[in-house]
Amino acid sequence: MTLPPITTKGEQAKAQLIHAALAQFGEYGLNATTRDIAALAGQNIAAIPYYFGSKEDLYLACAQWIADFISEQFQPHTLVAEHLLAQPVVDKAAIRGLILNACENMIALLTHDDTVNLSKFISREQLSPTAGYRLIHDRVIAPMHTHMTRLIAAYTGLDATDTRTILHTHALLGEILAFRLVRETILQRTGWSQFDEEKAGLVFKTITSHIDFILQGLSKGA
Protein backbone atom coordinates (compact mmCIF):
# COMPACT_ATOMS: atom_id res chain seq x y z
CA MET A 1 0.00 0.00 0.00
CA THR A 2 1.90 3.06 -1.23
CA LEU A 3 1.71 6.55 0.16
CA PRO A 4 0.25 9.21 -2.14
CA PRO A 5 2.65 11.35 -4.20
CA ILE A 6 4.47 13.89 -2.04
CA THR A 7 4.92 17.45 -3.23
CA THR A 8 5.41 19.48 -0.03
CA LYS A 9 6.78 18.96 3.46
CA GLY A 10 3.27 19.39 4.86
CA GLU A 11 1.83 16.78 2.54
CA GLN A 12 4.63 14.41 3.49
CA ALA A 13 3.85 14.87 7.19
CA LYS A 14 0.13 14.33 6.60
CA ALA A 15 0.79 11.20 4.53
CA GLN A 16 3.09 9.77 7.20
CA LEU A 17 0.50 10.46 9.90
CA ILE A 18 -2.29 8.78 7.90
CA HIS A 19 -0.07 5.78 7.16
CA ALA A 20 0.78 5.44 10.86
CA ALA A 21 -2.82 6.07 11.92
CA LEU A 22 -4.09 3.30 9.62
CA ALA A 23 -1.80 0.88 11.43
CA GLN A 24 -2.79 2.07 14.90
CA PHE A 25 -6.50 2.47 14.24
CA GLY A 26 -6.55 -0.89 12.47
CA GLU A 27 -5.07 -2.52 15.55
CA TYR A 28 -6.74 -0.55 18.35
CA GLY A 29 -9.62 1.38 16.82
CA LEU A 30 -10.28 4.78 18.33
CA ASN A 31 -8.50 3.57 21.47
CA ALA A 32 -5.24 4.20 19.62
CA THR A 33 -3.39 7.16 21.11
CA THR A 34 -2.24 10.24 19.24
CA ARG A 35 1.12 9.87 20.98
CA ASP A 36 1.67 6.40 19.49
CA ILE A 37 0.45 7.52 16.06
CA ALA A 38 2.80 10.51 16.04
CA ALA A 39 5.73 8.40 17.23
CA LEU A 40 5.14 5.78 14.53
CA ALA A 41 4.91 8.53 11.91
CA GLY A 42 8.10 10.17 13.17
CA GLN A 43 6.19 13.39 13.79
CA ASN A 44 5.63 15.67 16.77
CA ILE A 45 2.31 14.97 18.52
CA ALA A 46 1.30 18.59 17.83
CA ALA A 47 1.26 17.76 14.12
CA ILE A 48 -2.02 15.86 14.50
CA PRO A 49 -4.15 18.81 15.70
CA TYR A 50 -2.23 21.09 13.32
CA TYR A 51 -2.98 19.06 10.21
CA PHE A 52 -6.22 17.27 11.15
CA GLY A 53 -7.81 19.02 14.13
CA SER A 54 -8.42 15.99 16.36
CA LYS A 55 -7.95 12.25 16.61
CA GLU A 56 -11.50 11.76 15.35
CA ASP A 57 -10.80 13.95 12.35
CA LEU A 58 -7.64 11.94 11.65
CA TYR A 59 -9.76 8.79 11.81
CA LEU A 60 -12.09 10.19 9.16
CA ALA A 61 -9.10 11.22 7.08
CA CYS A 62 -7.98 7.57 7.17
CA ALA A 63 -11.44 6.49 6.04
CA GLN A 64 -11.24 8.98 3.18
CA TRP A 65 -7.77 7.70 2.26
CA ILE A 66 -9.13 4.14 2.12
CA ALA A 67 -12.07 5.23 -0.04
CA ASP A 68 -9.72 7.03 -2.42
CA PHE A 69 -7.36 4.04 -2.58
CA ILE A 70 -10.10 1.50 -3.32
CA SER A 71 -11.75 3.82 -5.84
CA GLU A 72 -8.47 4.22 -7.71
CA GLN A 73 -7.90 0.45 -7.78
CA PHE A 74 -11.34 -0.35 -9.21
CA GLN A 75 -12.12 2.69 -11.32
CA PRO A 76 -11.18 0.90 -14.58
CA HIS A 77 -13.54 -1.97 -13.74
CA THR A 78 -16.31 0.49 -12.89
CA LEU A 79 -16.01 2.25 -16.24
CA VAL A 80 -16.13 -1.04 -18.15
CA ALA A 81 -19.13 -2.19 -16.08
CA GLU A 82 -21.06 0.98 -16.87
CA HIS A 83 -20.31 0.52 -20.58
CA LEU A 84 -21.40 -3.12 -20.62
CA LEU A 85 -24.55 -2.47 -18.62
CA ALA A 86 -25.56 0.29 -21.05
CA GLN A 87 -25.50 -2.03 -24.06
CA PRO A 88 -28.86 -3.10 -25.55
CA VAL A 89 -27.64 -6.71 -25.95
CA VAL A 90 -26.14 -8.63 -23.04
CA ASP A 91 -22.55 -9.70 -23.76
CA LYS A 92 -22.21 -12.63 -21.37
CA ALA A 93 -18.60 -13.36 -22.27
CA ALA A 94 -17.57 -9.76 -21.59
CA ILE A 95 -19.53 -9.65 -18.33
CA ARG A 96 -17.93 -12.88 -17.11
CA GLY A 97 -14.52 -11.54 -18.08
CA LEU A 98 -15.08 -8.31 -16.16
CA ILE A 99 -16.33 -10.13 -13.05
CA LEU A 100 -13.26 -12.36 -13.14
CA ASN A 101 -10.90 -9.41 -13.66
CA ALA A 102 -12.41 -7.49 -10.77
CA CYS A 103 -12.24 -10.53 -8.51
CA GLU A 104 -8.64 -11.23 -9.51
CA ASN A 105 -7.74 -7.65 -8.60
CA MET A 106 -9.51 -8.02 -5.27
CA ILE A 107 -7.67 -11.26 -4.54
CA ALA A 108 -4.33 -9.62 -5.35
CA LEU A 109 -5.09 -6.80 -2.92
CA LEU A 110 -6.40 -9.03 -0.15
CA THR A 111 -3.44 -11.42 -0.25
CA HIS A 112 -0.87 -8.62 -0.16
CA ASP A 113 0.71 -7.81 3.21
CA ASP A 114 0.71 -4.07 2.49
CA THR A 115 -3.09 -3.93 2.71
CA VAL A 116 -3.45 -5.67 6.09
CA ASN A 117 -3.95 -2.42 8.02
CA LEU A 118 -6.58 -1.29 5.52
CA SER A 119 -8.43 -4.59 6.00
CA LYS A 120 -8.22 -4.32 9.79
CA PHE A 121 -9.66 -0.81 9.67
CA ILE A 122 -12.59 -1.85 7.47
CA SER A 123 -13.22 -5.03 9.50
CA ARG A 124 -13.54 -2.98 12.68
CA GLU A 125 -15.95 -0.66 10.92
CA GLN A 126 -18.05 -3.60 9.69
CA LEU A 127 -18.50 -4.84 13.27
CA SER A 128 -18.75 -1.46 15.00
CA PRO A 129 -19.59 1.12 12.33
CA THR A 130 -18.85 4.80 12.83
CA ALA A 131 -19.10 7.79 10.53
CA GLY A 132 -15.95 6.39 8.93
CA TYR A 133 -17.82 3.38 7.61
CA ARG A 134 -20.59 5.50 6.12
CA LEU A 135 -17.94 7.48 4.25
CA ILE A 136 -16.28 4.35 2.82
CA HIS A 137 -19.63 2.67 2.13
CA ASP A 138 -21.16 5.56 0.25
CA ARG A 139 -18.01 6.34 -1.71
CA VAL A 140 -16.90 2.88 -2.84
CA ILE A 141 -18.48 -0.18 -1.21
CA ALA A 142 -22.09 0.51 -2.20
CA PRO A 143 -21.26 1.47 -5.82
CA MET A 144 -18.98 -1.55 -6.29
CA HIS A 145 -21.51 -3.91 -4.68
CA THR A 146 -24.26 -2.46 -6.86
CA HIS A 147 -22.23 -2.79 -10.05
CA MET A 148 -21.40 -6.41 -9.27
CA THR A 149 -25.06 -7.16 -8.50
CA ARG A 150 -26.14 -5.62 -11.80
CA LEU A 151 -23.50 -7.58 -13.72
CA ILE A 152 -24.60 -10.86 -12.16
CA ALA A 153 -28.24 -9.97 -12.84
CA ALA A 154 -27.48 -9.11 -16.47
CA TYR A 155 -25.65 -12.41 -16.99
CA THR A 156 -28.23 -14.59 -15.27
CA GLY A 157 -31.46 -12.80 -16.14
CA LEU A 158 -32.27 -12.13 -12.48
CA ASP A 159 -33.64 -8.88 -11.07
CA ALA A 160 -30.79 -6.71 -9.76
CA THR A 161 -33.11 -5.13 -7.18
CA ASP A 162 -34.24 -8.49 -5.77
CA THR A 163 -32.85 -9.07 -2.29
CA ARG A 164 -31.92 -12.62 -3.28
CA THR A 165 -29.70 -11.34 -6.10
CA ILE A 166 -28.01 -8.94 -3.68
CA LEU A 167 -27.45 -11.83 -1.27
CA HIS A 168 -25.94 -14.00 -4.01
CA THR A 169 -23.58 -11.15 -4.88
CA HIS A 170 -22.62 -10.69 -1.25
CA ALA A 171 -21.98 -14.41 -0.85
CA LEU A 172 -19.71 -14.41 -3.90
CA LEU A 173 -17.71 -11.45 -2.61
CA GLY A 174 -17.59 -13.07 0.82
CA GLU A 175 -15.72 -16.04 -0.64
CA ILE A 176 -12.93 -13.69 -1.67
CA LEU A 177 -12.94 -11.71 1.57
CA ALA A 178 -12.56 -14.97 3.50
CA PHE A 179 -8.99 -15.29 2.25
CA ARG A 180 -8.15 -12.14 4.21
CA LEU A 181 -10.53 -12.29 7.15
CA VAL A 182 -9.78 -15.94 7.97
CA ARG A 183 -6.28 -15.81 6.53
CA GLU A 184 -4.64 -17.76 9.34
CA THR A 185 -7.02 -20.69 8.91
CA ILE A 186 -6.15 -21.21 5.25
CA LEU A 187 -2.44 -20.81 5.93
CA GLN A 188 -2.63 -23.44 8.66
CA ARG A 189 -4.78 -25.82 6.58
CA THR A 190 -2.58 -25.59 3.48
CA GLY A 191 0.77 -25.45 5.25
CA TRP A 192 1.61 -22.18 3.51
CA SER A 193 3.72 -19.69 5.41
CA GLN A 194 2.32 -16.72 3.49
CA PHE A 195 0.58 -15.71 0.31
CA ASP A 196 2.70 -15.04 -2.75
CA GLU A 197 1.92 -14.53 -6.44
CA GLU A 198 1.71 -18.27 -7.11
CA LYS A 199 -0.66 -18.90 -4.21
CA ALA A 200 -2.81 -15.90 -5.13
CA GLY A 201 -3.06 -17.42 -8.61
CA LEU A 202 -4.27 -20.70 -7.14
CA VAL A 203 -6.86 -18.84 -5.08
CA PHE A 204 -8.03 -17.07 -8.25
CA LYS A 205 -8.41 -20.36 -10.11
CA THR A 206 -10.53 -21.68 -7.25
CA ILE A 207 -12.69 -18.55 -7.17
CA THR A 208 -13.06 -18.68 -10.96
CA SER A 209 -14.59 -22.17 -10.69
CA HIS A 210 -16.99 -20.97 -8.01
CA ILE A 211 -17.99 -17.91 -10.03
CA ASP A 212 -18.81 -20.11 -13.01
CA PHE A 213 -20.83 -22.47 -10.80
CA ILE A 214 -22.76 -19.49 -9.44
CA LEU A 215 -23.39 -17.84 -12.80
CA GLN A 216 -24.45 -21.09 -14.47
CA GLY A 217 -26.56 -22.19 -11.52
CA LEU A 218 -28.38 -18.88 -11.22
CA SER A 219 -28.95 -18.76 -14.98
CA LYS A 220 -30.73 -22.13 -14.86
CA GLY A 221 -32.93 -20.94 -12.02
CA ALA A 222 -33.82 -17.60 -13.60
Image (cartoon, rainbow, N blue to C red):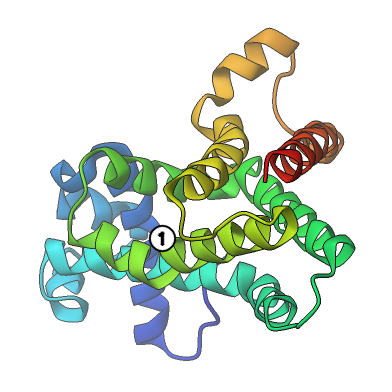
Q: Which residue is mark 1?
A: 19
| Residue 135 point in image, percent of width and height | 29, 68
Q: Is residue 158 visible?
A: yes
Q: Which residue reaches farthest bottom?
A: 7
Residue occupying image coordinates x 10% and y 68%: 54
| Residue 156 point in image, percent of width and height | 71, 52
- Please identify the quarter of the rendering in which residue 91 is found: bottom right
Camera-nearest residue between 66 and 211 = 211
| Residue 9 point in image, percent of width and height | 40, 86
Query: SS of the residue at dot 1?
Result: helix
Camera-nearest residue between 25 and 106 = 106
Camera-nearest residue between 56 and 89 = 89
Judge from the rendering whether residue 38 lies leftward or rightward of residue 122; answer left or right: left
Camera-nearest residue between 45 and 161 = 161
Which amino acid is tagged 1? His
Judge from the rendering whether residue 40 lies leftward or rightward of residue 178; answer left or right: left
| Residue 15 point in image, percent of width and height | 40, 72
Judge from the rendering whether residue 208 lies leftward or rightward of residue 24; answer left or right: right
Judge from the rendering whether residue 70 lies leftward or rightward of residue 92; answer left or right: left
- Please identify the quarter of the rendering in which residue 67 is found: bottom left
**Badge 1, how many Cα within 10 Å: few under 14, some, many 20+?**
many
- Please identify the quarter of the rendering in which residue 200 is found: top right
Q: Is residue 1 visible?
A: no
Is 213 situated above or below 9?
A: above
Q: How many marks?
A: 1
Residue occupying image coordinates x 76% and y 83%: 88
In which quadrant will I find the N terminus?
Answer: bottom right
Residue occupying image coordinates x 62% and y 68%: 73
Residue occupying image coordinates x 64% and y 10%: 188
